[in-house]
Image (cartoon, rainbow, N blue to C red):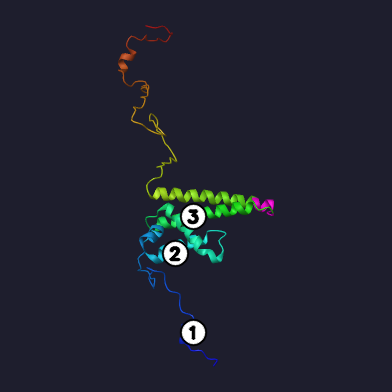
């Protein structure tokens, strides 16, 4: 008999049983176990597993039949960042991806059959990826309030008689500037300035 019923197909190819403790159906409301939340940051299983899987795809040189190893590597890298929410998990995932990208570019640049031009470009790509990873780590530190506070002064305008200090300012008193010279006729009686001064006549003799 050539026809095979659907029921017999199901019996011949039973579905793979789910792992112990894992839900049969995952939706947007399924919470993550604590060990998965520590990697994805959100507490929602569908998001946390997406972060782990996408990060695992960036792990180079992993055979198709050994993808579970890439997940272990990705989970180990993400756990080092200890993301506290979904945004921190995204930053951590990008940093891990940039790390592997830098390593992969460096590896390809050192291949014996690699041309000099391609090897030079790969080394530049590796350096750019490494710097970008550092930027992501610094962004995570700033989000957590651990980064250094930097104040950038674009323009300083000091009016006449004023002072400006650019740099690290301590509680020490600033040096006082000498008083500005007074204009003629200010601060003194104009009459006293001419008292006793000789009066010049038309012939140039003083009186």
Residue named by callout 2? 50
Q: Nearer the viewer, mark 2 or mark 1?
A: 1
Residue named by callout 1? 9
N-terminal of the two: label 3 or label 2? 2
Where is residue 49 shown, x and y percent of the image? 43, 64
Report crowding for label 1: few under 14, some 14 to 19, many 20 or more residues within 10 A (C-alpha).
few
Q: CA distance from mark 3 to mark 2?
A: 15 Å
For the point 34% across and 13% down, the residue is 194
- 12 or 170, which lies in front? 12
* Magenta range: 113-119
- Residue 180: numbered disc: none
Q: Is residue 115 magenta?
A: yes
N-terminal of the two: label 1 or label 3? 1
Does residue 47 sit above or below 16 in this rendering?
above
Residue named by callout 3? 96
Where is residue 192 shown, x and y percent of the image? 31, 14
Q: Is residue 8 magenta?
A: no
Task: Say which quarter of the image contains residue 158.
Answer: top left
Where is residue 144 shown, x and y percent of the image? 38, 49
Does residue 44 sit above or below 134 in this rendering?
below
Helix, strand or loop for disc 2: helix
Q: Quadrant of the C terminus?
A: top left
Report crowding for label 3: few under 14, some 14 to 19, many 20 or more residues within 10 A (C-alpha).
many
Does residue 143 sit above or below 201 in this rendering?
below
């Amino acid at each position: 008999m050539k026809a095979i019923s659907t029921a017999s197909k199901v019996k011949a190819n039973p579905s793979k049983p789910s792992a112990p403790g894992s839900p049969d159906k995952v939706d947007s409301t399924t919470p993550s176990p604590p060990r998965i939340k520590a990697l994805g940051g959100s507490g929602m299983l569908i998001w946390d597993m997406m972060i782990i899987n996408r990060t695992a795809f960036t792990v180079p040189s992993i055979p198709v039949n050994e993808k579970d190893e890439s997940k272990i590597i990705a989970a180990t890298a993400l756990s080092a960042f200890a993301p506290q929410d979904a945004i921190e998990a995204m930053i951590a995932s990008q940093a891990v991806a940039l790390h592997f990208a830098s390593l992969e570019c460096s590896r390809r640049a050192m291949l014996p059959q690699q041309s000099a031009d391609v090897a030079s470009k790969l080394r530049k790509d590796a350096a750019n990826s490494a710097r970008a990873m550092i930027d992501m780590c610094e962004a995570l530190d700033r989000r957590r309030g651990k980064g250094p506070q930097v104040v950038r002064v674009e323009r300083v305008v000091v009016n006449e008689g004023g002072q400006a200090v650019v740099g690290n300012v301590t509680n020490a008193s600033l040096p006082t500037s000498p008083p500005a010279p007074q204009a003629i006729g200010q601060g003194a009686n104009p009459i006293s300035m001419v008292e006793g001064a000789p009066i010049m006549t038309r012939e140039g003799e003083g009186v």
